[in-house]
Amino acid sequence: MLTVIIGVYTLYVLISIYTSVMQIGYVNQAKRKEAVLLNDIDFLKAGNYAVRKEKMTLVSSFVDYLLFIAWMGFGVQTLQENIFFENEAFLTVVIVMSFIVINSLISLPFAYYEKFVIDKEFGFNKSGIGLWVKDTLISFFLTLLFGSLVVFGIFLIIFNFVLWWVWSFIFIFAVIILINMLYPAFRATFFDKLTPLKDEELDDKIKELMDKTGFVSSGVFVSDASKRDARLNAYFGGFGKAKRVVLFDTLIEKLTTKELLAVLGHELGHFAHGDIYKNIGLVGAMLFVMFGVFGNLPDTLYMEMGLSPEPYVLMILLMLFMPVLGFVMMPIMGIVSRHNEYAADKMGSELGGPAGAIELANALRKLVTENKSFPLSHPIYIFFHYTHPPVLERLKELGVDINDTSSSSLEGKCEANI
């Protein structure tokens, strides 16, 4: 059984590496051809950025694989042999959180390299070392605190219910919903500073837009995201009357009022179509499958690992294999998500009036330019990774004439060329 488990994970890593290699080759070839959507300089820069990020993903995937082999081979057993507490609940919490902390520490160099080497080189990173360390420490302590509570909750469920995996799924699913509800408040408290939108004219137009779709919000806020990152973004957070509309200050700076309203119209389209609930349902289905599989593993697996089926072992195995199931589910979630994006684009363009499609198209072009998003990708990479349709397809669906693009960069598939 252990061989099967390792074989499945190995297959996942090989497919993941293959898609990254094909993407790198595709982008390396496409970026040298005629520019699409962007000017020549930005097109090349976006291609270089995409390649750098994907190469880092390749290295990270290889490290994750070695880490997985280490945990399955001796890592979990080492934790079990070196951590002693009489209280089983406390023992479970300490071992599981030790596993999480070790993985987090190993991932830190990648996070640092991405932010202070790649993102800095391409003009995204605006924060200094001090702010990054502060953010990392806050995230670390929040993970320790709330992670320990969640682990303790699952421990209690395992010891009190025969069908523990069903109740654990319900518990984790409820935690995910709670996180979505509290995310804006936590982000405002510990990271970004949120202030009410001061532009009364823009605020009135946004509220008028929300009224058209029945979206009830606790207010429109501006995030000082520019102190960390130059990317453009906005999000709706929370549930019920606690929902917030949060605009990054970078978005307000770069988009015109009509373009900004078109972007928010798109997001309101997601709300009107109930896409957030569809996405939560898909995540719930994925979690249910995962808990169902790992809640019924044969005892032979634990024997092969030299372990007993303790709660902390079950939880660690769940976390180790979560990326695998996520990768398997991603194509399904991607198909649904891309369909939802087209529908949200349509509604966003309709909410914007006669010129709504043009304004949304202009906003999409600016987002591609400012976020240095390379507009072309290998089909297999899109299949496994894209939750949004390629921007060219979105523009075509909107009926916008793309007069500054060329088909030469879209022809054929590229061979890998790292």
Image (tube, grey):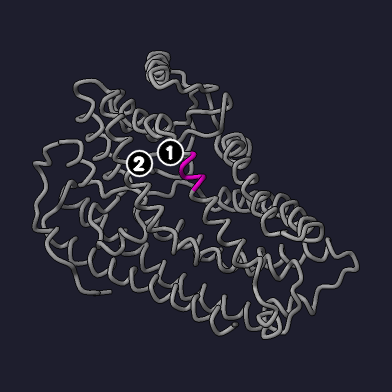
**x and y, in percent, of residue 345 in the image:** 29, 35
Position of residue 300 measured from the top left corner of the image (x, y, whole percent): 68, 82
Q: Residue at x 38, y 73 (%)?
A: 15
Residue 144 coordinates in the image, percent (x, y): 71, 55
Residue indicated by mark 2: 340
Which corner quadrant of the image does residue 305 belong to?
bottom right
Across and down, in percent, residue 223 comes to 49, 33
Q: Which residues are magenta?
A: 277-281
Side of 151 where 391 appears, left or right = left
Task: Identify the amino acid type marked 2.
Answer: Asn
Under mark 1, the amino acid is Asp
Q: What is the crowding at mark 1: few (fewer than 14 residues within 10 Å), some, or many (at least 20)?
A: some
Q: Secondary structure at mark 2?
A: helix
Quarter holding residue 399: top left
Whether pointer 1 and pointer 2 mark residues with C-beta atoms closer than 8 Å, the reply is yes
Q: Residue at x 26, y 44 (%)?
A: 369
Q: Secondary structure at mark 1?
A: helix
**Residue placed furthest toward the right:** 86
Q: Quadrant of the C terminus?
A: bottom left
Q: Residue at x 62, y 61 (%)?
A: 291
Q: Quadrant of residue 234?
A: top left
Q: Nearer the viewer, residue 19 or 102?
A: 19
Image position of 262 (left or right of 32) = right
The N terminus lies in which quarter of the figure?
bottom right
The residue at which mark 1 appears reads as: 275
Q: Does 298 appear in magenta?
A: no
Q: Main secondary structure of the magenta part?
A: helix
For residue 263, above or below residue 229: above
